[in-house]
Image (tube, helix red, strand yellow):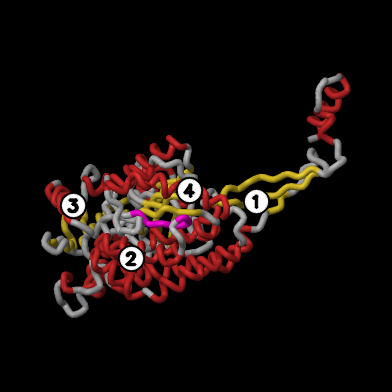
Amino acid sequence: MDTLHTTTAHLDLIPQLFEQQKLRSLALRDEPVERRVKKLKRLKKWIKRHRSAIQDAIYQDFRKPTYETDGSEILFILQEINHAIKYLSEWASPQKVRTPVTLPGTSAYVQYEPKGVCLIMAPWNYPFQLLVAPWVSAIAAGNCCILKPSEMAPHTSELIFEMVASILPRDEAVVLQGDQEVAEALLKQPFDHIFFTGSTPVGKIIMKAAAENLSSVTLELGGKSPTIVDETANLKVAAKKIAWGKFMNAGQTCIAPDYILVHESVHDSLVEHLRTTLQTFYQPNQAPVEQSTDYARIINQKHFDRLREALEEAVSQGATVAIGGQHHAESRFMAPTVLTNVPADTTLMREEIFGPILPIRKYRTLPEAVDYINNKPKPLAQYVFSEKKRVQKYILRRTSAGGVTVNDVILHISHPDLPFGGVSHSGMGKAHGRYGFLEFSNQKAVLKQKWGVKATQVLYPPYTDRFKRAMDRLLQWI
């Protein structure tokens, strides 16, 4: 399996690779933390040496600007590695727990052991970050991994193959490239854990396949992440933050603001601030947006057509194109687009957009906005722009989301001490930092009884009247 792509002829080698890693994982159970740290340092060194190669690969896949790659892919991973290196010894140390009065003579602790052989499956939209970040957690926890990058980002996928092969032997980590057939073959293996990032429909398929082997899963999915802007928000600042988070990566971000709910009194003003902001971002010299080197492209023709059709449907049903709307199929370019008066029953308001189209809807009262959000599946992220703490608390308490950023967007994903993940339809399990370490670890309960302590003998049969009286007293006292 030394080729870059797993062809149909190689599918029968997947069980062999799995068995090799299963055998190796037994040896890694007793691996010192220091060796895991060395692996992470090797990974960090490779990334820093190959910064330009990472930028070039992602640019070739969908023209992602190099500085967006630096910030959202490379910097993100380096921070994740540094955090793990700094705190891994603390995370991996057994955690002592208190001894209850009902267990005299005992001591107890939680021991963190590797789950074993893990499968990590990543999407195309952040093809480097979304594969390597969970791999960092898996290495920190002491696991072996089979890594499946997205075939939709082939240049990045090949680079990841070269990276992994240069850092670890394939019985500890190996990259398998290929399409759905390869993914299906992998999912037949009894992995100890599966970490999947992608869409909710595919997440359901992953979970169903994992159930056949009772593999634990982490599902980082998506959803329609709402943004609420109330009448007290600083609209100029909010427009810049929302535009950055929405149109970075051409809107192909799982936690991008999906739609805006804005108080009716500031609706028109917000639209104008967005217009000014987008001109500043992508048309500083009044040139067409398509000429901007700071704006990405849609990943492939299928996704371009999906977005174009959703846009045309919304307009045909009464939506107004307030900003943008231009698109060119040949280059898969779709301009940053803002829509107003978007009907609730359109595709754009029912399904995750995952592209550079931003619908804006008005609300009159805060309960009305909250009800609108709560009538949809729980999102991966949520954003609130308000100067009133009362409003912030009201929304936080009455809605549910995987994560929230107040008076900004996206930033919660970059905090190394915050868990990242969804809830319900937007995912399960948490990633990053210590939470990622725990996700790839079995938290094993260990209790030790001192020799000579016979406290539990009172629980042995036969259950005499004396035993019953003692139990009655205990239950009254406890």
The tag earlier along the polypeptide, 1 or 2, is 1
Q: In the image, is residue 287 above or below residue 232?
A: below
Residue 91 x/y as whole percent: 61, 59
The tag earlier along the polypeptide, 3 or 2, is 2
Does the magenta portion include 267? no
Q: What is the crowding at mark 3: few (fewer than 14 residues within 10 Å), some, or many (at least 20)? A: few
Residue type beneath disc 1: Gln
Quadrant in the picture for the C terminus: top right
The circle on residue 302 is 3
What is the CA distance from the residue labelled 3 to the residue labelled 4?
30 Å
The answer to whether mark 3 and mark 2 are in CB contact below 8 A is no
Label 4, on which residue? Answer: 429
| Front tag of 3 and 2 | 2
Label 1, on which residue? Answer: 111
Q: Residue at x 79, y 43 (%)?
A: 449
Residue type beneath disc 2: Leu
Q: In the image, is residue 365 above or below residue 335?
A: above
Residue 253 x/y as whole percent: 32, 58
Label 2, on which residue? Answer: 159
Q: In the image, is residue 54 above or below residue 398?
A: below
What is the CA distance from the residue labelled 2 to the residue labelled 4?
28 Å
Q: Which residues are magenta?
A: 171-176
